[in-house]
Image (cartoon, grey):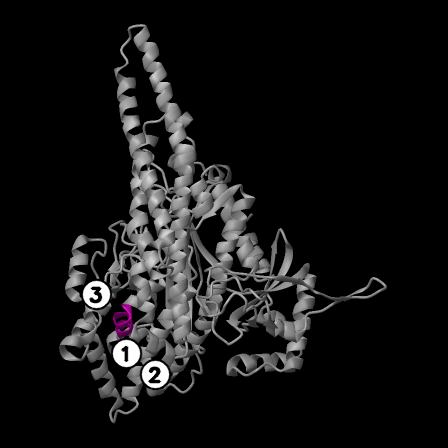
Amino acid sequence: MSQKEEQFTIADIYGEDVFSDKVMKARLTKNVYRKLHQTMEEGKALDPLVADEIAEAMKQWAMEKGATHYTHWFQPLTGTTAEKHDSFISSAEPDGTILMELSGKNLIKGEPDASSFPSGGLRATFEARGYTAWDMSSPAFVRRDAAGAILCIPTAFCSYNGEALDFKTPLLRSVDAIDQQSIRLLRLFGNTTSKKVTPCVGPEQEYFLVDKQTFSRRKDLVYTGRTLFGAMPPKGQEMDDHYYGSLRTRVGSFMKDVNEELWKLGVPAKTQHNEVAPAQHELAVIYENASLAVDNNHVVMQTLKRVASWHNMRCLLHEKPFAGVNGSGKHNNWSLQTDDGINLLDPGKTPHENVQFLLVLACILRAVDLHADLLRESAADTGNDHRLGADEAPPAIISVFLGDQLEDLVSQLIETGTATSSIRGGKMTTGVSTLPDFSKDATDRNRTSPFAFTGNKFEFRMVGAQDSIAGPNIVLNTIVAESFSDACDILEKADDFDQAARALIKQYLTEHQRIIFNGNGYADEWIEEAQRRGLENLPSMVDSIPALLTDTSVEMFDKFGVYSLCELESRAEIKYENYAKTIHIEAMTMIDMASKSFIPAVIRWTRSLADTIGALENVGADAFVQRDLLTESSALLRDTQGALKELIRLTEEAERAPEGRERALFYHESVMPAMEALRAPVDRLEMIVDKEMWPVPSYGDLLFEV
């Protein structure tokens, strides 16, 4: 296919399965289309008659696409999406005819029950009434899978009393908060034309691909998404030859299908490449408003898994599916954009003269410093505990990378209160006559920083590959809204705004400069330096969860209406419970594999060695090698059995511990080390036992078969 034909194909299919603004404009009457946009912009209730017309148009469009059912597509506190399908059939007549309908009421509101989803005490199981509400900021779409074509309507999910039972509701609240406070700030700078400020997000998604048949022979991958045992193969990622390498045929075919499926659903898939670890890859999308970006990232994860099955593969989204090679993250690129095209994080050509940008920057640094614990918690899950700080991902200490240009500006402002110049990028010269010189950026990048400025946005690199990006963006939006609000409270009272703004910039930068770090975040020296600066190091998910319930966090979230106290308490409870359940499943999987697979396999191996030794000695031959292997294998088998018994004991004890933080801590402090103690001898045995007798595929089989 030629480049021209390929471009035409993309344009032809892009968004064809999305009930987009373009489709609504074509299918709705002008009056209804206008009222819908008025409702979206002003946040008013949608007129029932308008809702009915929109629902009818949406139903007709979806049925033309082959849809037979519709669903309110929502994001419960499991971190994934959920749906209940209803057909368009509303009644069946005695003569066999049926009436197909999607009413405005059913479009706007659903009642899916969904009482078994995690609620952290917000409602009891017997309290079954939960509501889904149409999120007009994210378009409906038709998804095709084994269930047929389904009209998916993005929604929020709340309890009968209005508490948020999902990620979407607090995300939308945080979007409102940052919008309101950003507009306050812009008005102080004389901007009277911008009406709305929207957080924009562009996530980069990392993932692994493994062969489906090989995957199915690993109980740990099937049950937990990661390998709980496994010795490193002779070659891992040492040569870095997989990184940005040519795509293998099977992977290239997979990526082609992924792109086409995403483009049909209006997901702007942009970049694809091999990542650094064998069998690891990355997909990045173009920036979108935060709500749509969250929805589309879920679509991306689901599409990766679905299309992998078409190609007889499995997509692994766990943060650390293989020990010894890089894990997978999800870089959350975040910026603030006005409705008339102004990026508040764009420093311009002369950043030292851009007072508005400097104040925005100072407020963000203040926000990150004041709420580093919350930002760390927003990227916390059990899988990410294995990845953060492992010479491949940012450490668990929050810091901000600004680069040479902005760090120089900050130094000037702290010292004198005024910046008089900005470092420029200059020319890139290669010394090769056939290569053109070109302008380079004013600063390099820092891949070890958890929160890095990258030209006109901040890149939050801590987020785990399988996590929803809603949590990090809820925190980012809210903490920055707070700093904007505090700044506006001061500046709105100032007699001389320009002088007050410059003084506040200096104050914020001086008070919060400790959060700025442009060095190597992987270095051990940074841990010591961070401690000296007073920056928190929260290495595990269990360590970070209390950040949700500090007085500072509770007060801030309540002030901006993002979370109530009971909603925060529920989320902390759910996270402790999820941690304990996840480690319990992993421990039980290890117990199952060790007792039913590895120990019996090693027993067979040692028996074969013993038989061989006996046979050799009967004929007077030397059996030194076999005897040495038998001695070593038997010792490791004994270690394995001892570690297995200890893991069983501790897992049973953990389940007797009180639920909540105490149980999660026990799993973290006692069960996790016992799991590592069991893995160690098994992995050593894998390097000794005949491969034909080893009961599961090796790392080499998993990482190099695709």
Answer with the quarter of the image where residue 591 lies.
top left
Residue at the bottom extreme of this rendering = 495
* Cα gap from disc 3 to disc 2, whole angstroms: 29 Å
Residue that badge 1 annotates: 359
Q: Residues within 10 Å of mark 2 (few under 14, many from 20)?
A: many
Question: Is residue 294 visible in this depiction of the protein?
Answer: yes
Residue that badge 2 annotates: 185
How far from the left and from the top, in percent, is residue 335? 37, 70
Q: 508 or 11, which lies in front?
A: 508
Residue at the right extreme of this rendering = 95
Segment colored magenta: 363-372
Residue at 59% across, 81% down: 46
State if disc 2 and disc 1 touch (CB < 8 Å): yes
Q: How crowded is mark 1: few (under 14 residues within 10 Å), some or many (20 or more)?
A: many
Q: 443 or 646, which lies in front?
A: 646
The image shows residue 433, relative to residue 121, as above or below, that is above
- Among numbered discs 1 and 2, the one appearing first in the sequence: 2
Residue 535 is marked as 3
Q: What residue type is labelled 3?
A: Leu
